[in-house]
Amino acid sequence: MTNQYDLIILGGGASAFAAAIKANELKKKTAIINSGLPAGGTCVNVGCVPSKLLLHAGEVLHMAKNHGVPGIELEVKNFNFNKVIEDELKMVEGFRNEKYEKVLKNLEYVTYVEGKAQFSGEKEIEVNGEKLSADKFIIATGSTANVPPIEGIKEVGYVTHIEALKLKEQPKEMAIIGAGPVGLEFAQMYSRFGTKVTILQSRERIFPHGESELTARLTELLEKEGVTIKTNVEIKSARSENGKKILSYTVNGETEEVIADEILLAAGKTANTDALNLDVPGVKVNECKAVAVNDTFETNIPYIYAVGDVTNLPLRLETTAGHEGTLVVENALNEKKNSIDYNTVPYAIFTDPGYASVGLTEDAQMERDGVCACRTVPFEVIPKAGITRRTEGLIKMGIHPKTKVILGVHILAPNAADLIAQAMVLVKNKNTIDDVLNSEPVFPTMSEAIKYVALSFTKDISQLSCCI
């Protein structure tokens, strides 16, 4: 006997839960099938929530020693790595209970199933020995950290972000492969805890998709804190020696080695599609195993949709995954054509200072339009930054040279992820710099930086008084 549903959702993360909540609102009989990570998926269990707690702990340690206020001398009496990790895991459990497990109990039309699902026929899956069928399916199974093809890496052993969030012993030395958001955040986090950290990056610079002027400054700041960053690296092999893990690599034609207690893999992710039997319904995946979808989240099979990290969509964020989950249900069940303009979605790296961006970088604007009107302003000229002694950051804005429409804003500053919210609205609404110049931000705040960078297109901002 086959259990019949209106909708079956494969996965249990942000996009899957958003889809289940929307389906419940529409009073559609829905099954959500989850395996691997507990309910909530990556973000709440092994991603955004736990990593930001540990980053905050590292920031507290760092600021105690580097607050820069004359007349105040602070001392860190103790740092207990295990207690910090215990607190992180306890908070994760609380978030998961409040935001996912309790939510599930109130979804009248949704059945939650733990088990590995795979397609077994047209409009049919098998899970835990049972057959389930539905009119529509949503694939939201997420992704898993890549294991690069490095000789000896599996024998030597490694950790991903999952294990790095719950290590029982703090490593004295850590090598991190990859310099994207995960690699950079974990590098600073562990460095501030007292671990000697080396980043090995295959590309020319860290986070190559970001605004190069700002990521170059972030590189300088991380190195100043003690993080070693090697770029243009080709890792050749891994081996164990005297209880240590050794990575051999070449950089600029020279062979070098780094010795570590732990190797953290942070070199991208692979979509979780291998175990789904997608060849049964004939769902197409790309060369990276990601489900190929169009801008309304449809696969090549009319009754199957996909959202989140499992897809070829341009951004892999908690915010986009959740929004995609809501929109895809309306598309699948109500024949809507919802989509997301990913060019107006902000993203962030939660280092300190943080990096946040929305819209086009200078390189992207040059590639698209062949011209860029861009300005960069150091936070040294922002009064609040001077007051709090956090002047190390930069803000950059790109506009259309004729219409003055704001095409991109990029921020390197404390709490950059919070500051980018205003810029998101400006880019999304196609505002001009004149709109910003006619605004009155609160003084003194870091958010004044957005008005300062807009003013820099028409004025010498070094000649302005405080209240602009």
Image (cartoon, rainbow, N blue to C red):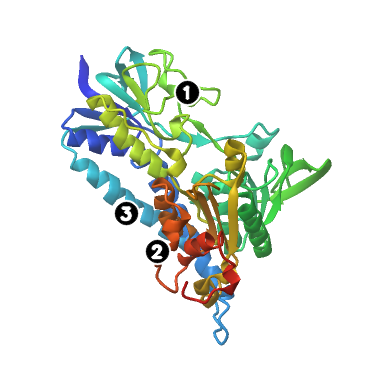
What amino acid type should be assigned to the residue bearing mark 1? Asp
How far, Cα to Cα, is label 1 from label 2? 52 Å
Give the label, 1 or 2, closer to the camera.
2
Residue 271's spot in the image, x, y percent?
A: 48, 30
Compared with 206, 24 (above or below) is above
Q: Is residue 167 visible?
A: no
Q: Quadrant of residue 23?
A: top left
How far, Cα to Cα, is label 2 from label 3? 41 Å
Relative to residue 240, is residue 37 drawn left or right? Answer: left
What amino acid type should be assigned to the residue bearing mark 2? Ser
Residue 196's spot in the image, x, y percent?
A: 66, 58
Q: Going 39% across and 21% down the picture, which residue do you hit? A: 299
Residue extending farthest front: 402
Residue 158's spot in the image, x, y percent?
A: 60, 42
Residue 350's spot in the image, x, y percent?
A: 50, 55
How far, Cα to Cα, is label 1 from label 3? 32 Å
Compared with 195, 385 (above or below) is below
Disc 1 + disc 3, Cβ < 8 Å: no
Q: Secondary structure at mark 2?
A: loop
Relative to residue 304, is residue 198 drawn left or right? Answer: right
**Within 10 angstroms of label 1, few (less than 14), some, or many (20 or more) residues?**
few
What amino acid type should be assigned to the residue bearing mark 3? Gly
Q: Determine which residue is flagged by label 3.
A: 94
Q: Going 65% across and 64% down the picture, which residue do you hit? A: 225
Q: Determine which residue is flagged by label 1.
A: 274
Compared with 302, 251 (above or below) is below
Q: Determine which residue is flagged by label 2.
A: 439
42 or 214, which lies in front? 214
**Label for residue 74?**
none
Compared with 449, 250 (above or below) is above
